[in-house]
Amino acid sequence: MKRLFLLFIVLALLVVVPFLIWGDRFEGTMTHGNMVDWMRSAGSWAWALGIGLLLIDLFLPIPGTVVMSALGLVYGWFTGGLLSAIGSMAAGILAYWLCRKLGRRAARWLASDEGIAEGEQLFTGETGGWLVALSRWMPVLAEVVACMAGLSRMDFRRFFAALCVGSIPMGFVFAWIGHAGEDTPGTALLLSAVLPPLIWGFFRLIYLRIR
């Protein structure tokens, strides 16, 4: 387990370092008002700008919740929520496949075969789905867990289901916050924390009954 924890720490540092270097600059520039202005100036391509920003949030300290709120204000809570969910899921899928295809050798060097085996055991069990679903509303952890799932070669169908369970409620909640004109994220954080485990548990129950 120590090897697996080391791998987790290294991935977390890779995500955190851009925040430490450029975080203040991005937060100062990418305010909610500025984000809305940029999207409106993009015209009919505002949706692509929003999804693109959510994608590069994997590499740069883009305030994803601000992007989602701006999408909600520009497109309304439903379309904005749908676009936000798509962007969040696209980022998770990108992290998963990049680490699955390109990061396996580096992960083995850091954590050894033993650590990789521990990760595979963790993400192929019941815990893996919960980790993916719950991590989507957590800063830093969303990217790290998606990468860990890819490195551990978690079954993609299972990963995608858990990703949807976490990303869809979060996208719609933050889009609703933007559409409603709210300027405090407290309600969004509460709802996005409560909804993913409830939805994941519901789908898990259906899966077990069908099985």
Image (cartoon, rainbow, N blue to C red):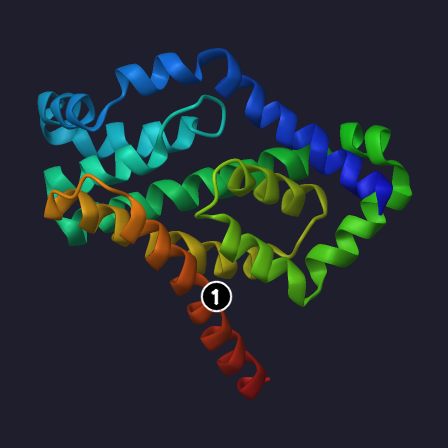
- Residue 5, position in %: x, y? 77, 40
Q: Quadrant of residue 12?
A: top right
Q: Is residue 171 visible?
A: no
Density class for disc 1 (Cα within 10 Å; few <14, some 14-19, many ≥20) is: some
Q: Secondary structure at mark 1?
A: helix
Q: Quadrant of residue 25?
A: top left
Tell me which residue sits at (15%, 28%) in the image.
Answer: 36
Given the image, on which type of amino acid does mark 1 rest?
Answer: Pro
Tell me which residue sits at (54%, 86%) in the image.
Answer: 210
- Residue 147, position in %: x, y? 62, 39
Q: Is residue 83 visible?
A: yes
Left or right, residue 39 beside residue 187: left
Tell me which residue sits at (12%, 23%) in the image.
Answer: 37
Left or right, residue 45 beside residue 135: left
User: Considering only vertical position in the picture, is 7 above or below 136?
Assistant: above
Residue under circle 1? 197
Left or right, residue 100 beside residue 51: right
Decide which of 150, 173 is in the foreground and name it.
173
